[in-house]
Amino acid sequence: MRVRFLVSMAGVGSVRDPGDVAECSPGEAARLIAAGFAEPADPPATVPPEKPHRAKPGKPEKADHDPAAKAEKR
């Protein structure tokens, strides 16, 4: 798993500065993230949002469907 370091870290043979991205095991990545030293470098896979449903253009439907009311209007 790739992580992006948020703090400086140094060890035998490696130095990490804030913003550096490194590959590490899932267990080590989980410990670094839990301690607040790093964050996941690869964004989680997301599903694109669905497009909103749009009504077809045209005449709006009338709200009054009472046949008795139509007969009185005539």
Image (spheres, helix red, strand yellow):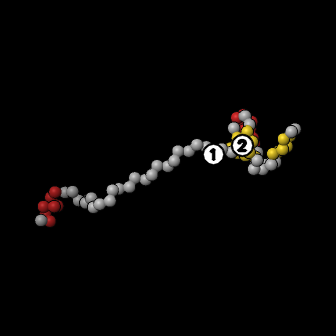
- Label 1: few (<14), some or many (≥20) within 10 Å? few
Residue 40 place in picture, x, y as percent: 68, 44
What's under tag 2, amino acid-wise? Val
**Which element carries disc 1, helix, strand or loop?**
loop
Does the rendering let one see residue 74? Answer: yes
Q: Is residue 25 above or below residue 63?
A: above
Residue 24 place in picture, x, y as percent: 74, 37
* Camera-nearest residue between 68 and 6: 6
* Camera-nearest residue between 52 and 74: 52
What's under tag 1, amino acid-wise? Pro
Q: Is residue 69 rendered to the left or right of residue 57?
A: left
Residue 24, label in figure: none
Q: Residue at x 45, y 52 (%)?
A: 51
Q: Which residue is disc 1 drawn over?
A: 43
Q: Residue at x 87, y 38 (%)?
A: 12
The image quadrant that residue 45 belongs to is top right
Q: Which residue is disc 2 drawn over?
A: 3
**Which element carries disc 2, helix, strand or loop?**
strand
Q: Residue at x 68, y 45 (%)?
A: 41
Q: Quadrant of the N terminus?
A: top right
Q: Is residue 3 rendered to the left or right of residue 49?
A: right
Whether the residues at callouts 2 and 1 have beta carbons within 8 Å, the answer is no
Does the rendering let one see residue 34? Answer: no
Residue 31 place in picture, x, y as percent: 74, 38
- Label 2: few (<14), some or many (≥20) within 10 Å? many
The image quadrant that residue 66 belongs to is bottom left
Residue 19 place in picture, x, y as percent: 75, 50
Q: Earlier in the sequence, mark 2 or mark 1?
A: 2
Q: Residue furthest bottom?
A: 73
* Camera-nearest residue between 57 and 37: 57
Q: Residue at x 86, y 39 (%)?
A: 13
